[in-house]
Each structure stands twice: as C-alpha cells, then as structure tokens.
C-alpha cells in the first residue's frame, strides 16, 4: 500500500524529478515487482523527453525496470537505444549487462546498431569486467542476437562462451538438490 501511495504522489511531481530520481523510481518499482502502469506511462513520457540528461546507469536502470515488469514503451526504448549508441563508451559492465538484458526482452527498432554497440563495448571491457550475474544477462542478449543477428555482428567467442557457462552455472546452482535414497 505504501508503494502505491508513493507512486500516486510521484506521478504528480515527475516533472520535478531529476533523471536519477526518474530512473530510481522505476528501478524501485521493478525491484519490488510492483506493477503501476499509470506511473510507468508517466515515467516513460518524462524520461523520453529528457533521455539526453540520463547517465548510462540511469539509462540502464530505466530499461531494466520496464523490461522486468514487461511494460511496453516502444518510444522510450527507441530513445534509450539511440542515446545508448551515442554514449556506449561510457557504459560500465553493469550498465551494459542491464541494458543488453532489457533489450533482449523488449527489443528496439534500431536493433542492428544497438547490438553492434553493446557487443563492441562488451568486447572492449573484456570478460574480467563482468560478474557472473552480468554474464548471465549478456547470455540472454546473445541468444537473441544469435537467433536473428545483424549481418555484420561478430560476437567474441570467449565472451559468448563465458556468458553461456555463467548461465549454466547459475541454472545448476538454482536447481534443488536431490537426496539419494538407498
């Protein structure tokens, strides 16, 4: 109930929010799996207009929240994609992983350029920059890319394999242990 009240209050003041506050509001609702369609519609409109002021982390967190809650916002995601492509060199590993995962879930009109930008930045950062969870997020992204790749894309084999291995490890760790009965 508290989050619903906060969401209702936030909707009346989103125009006053900084990009950080917009992204953090979306992230908080996504983290709590709290669906608030009217709030997210308002956040999408406000964020789309100010996406150029968002940091890479704000961009990635906003995309992640919308994808996590499966809230369609094609115009926002197209704006996020355009801004991500422009500033991909400033994205850190977590920003790349969150944005890549979000776009694997939601997609975008400018897919080819975005895929190439994310792939190039991931390769530039190198395998060691990504945690196991981040590699799992990239694995989701690479699955989508491999299913329908842009013609010019070449995913570095070491990175792709490490992401696949991280996902397999995460899946094995989440399976319940079975007791052997004799």
Image: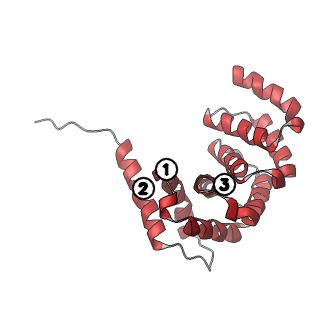
- The local crowd at label 3, few if under 14, some if 14 to 19, many if 20 or more residues have their Cα within 10 Å, is some
Please report contact status of discs 1 and 3: CB closer than 8 Å, yes or no. Answer: no
Left or right position of 123 against 53 = left
Tell me how far mark 1 sits from mark 3, CA to CA: 19 Å
For mark 2, what is the residue? 166
- Which numbered disc flags the more N-terminal residue, 3 or 2? 3
The dot on residue 56 is none
Residue at image point 87% right, 31% down: 13
Place residue 71 in its image quadrant. Answer: top right
For mark 3, what is the residue? 106
Tell me how far mark 3 sits from mark 2, CA to CA: 22 Å
Residue at image point 59% right, 54% down: 101
Q: Is residue 171 above or below residue 154?
A: above
For mark 1, what is the residue? 133
Residue 51: x and y in percent read 81, 52
- The local crowd at label 1, few if under 14, some if 14 to 19, many if 20 or more residues have their Cα within 10 Å, is some
- The local crowd at label 2, few if under 14, some if 14 to 19, many if 20 or more residues have their Cα within 10 Å, is many
Residue at image point 59% right, 76% down: 153
Please report contact status of discs 1 and 2: CB closer than 8 Å, yes or no. Answer: yes
Left or right position of 136 against 181 = right
Please report contact status of discs 3 and 2: CB closer than 8 Å, yes or no. Answer: no
Left or right position of 24 against 173 = right
Which residue is the extreme one toward the left? 182
Q: Nearer the viewer, mark 3 or mark 2?
A: 2
Query: Quick one: 71 or 92, which is closer to the camera?
Result: 92
Q: Is residue 83 above or below residue 58?
A: below
As helix, strand or loop, the secondary structure at mark 3 comes to helix
Residue at image point 52% right, 66% down: 126
- Which numbered disc flags the more N-terminal residue, 1 or 3? 3
Which residue is the extreme one toward the top? 1
Residue 53: x and y in percent read 83, 51
Quadrant (top left, top right, bottom left, bottom right) of the C terminus: top left
């Amino acid at each position: 109930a508290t989050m619903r009240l906060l969401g209702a209050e936030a909707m009346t003041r989103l125009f006053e929010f900084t990009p950080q506050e917009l992204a953090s509001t979306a992230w908080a609702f996504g983290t709590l799996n709290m669906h608030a369609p009217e709030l997210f519609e308002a956040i999408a409109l406000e964020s789309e207009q100010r996406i150029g002021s968002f940091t890479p982390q704000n961009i990635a967190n906003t995309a992640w929240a919308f994808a996590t809650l499966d809230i369609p916002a094609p115009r926002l995601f197209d704006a996020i994609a355009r801004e991500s492509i422009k500033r991909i060199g400033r994205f850190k590993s977590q920003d790349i992983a969150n944005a890549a995962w979000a776009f694997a879930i939601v997609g975008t009109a400018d897919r080819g350029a975005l895929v190439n930008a994310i792939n190039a930045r991931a390769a530039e950062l190198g395998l060691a920059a990504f945690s196991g969870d981040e590699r799992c997020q990239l694995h989701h992204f690479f699955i989508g890319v491999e299913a329908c790749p842009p013609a010019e894309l070449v995913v570095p084999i070491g990175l792709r394999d490490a992401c696949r291995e991280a996902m397999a490890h995460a899946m094995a760790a989440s399976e319940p242990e079975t007791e052997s009965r004799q």
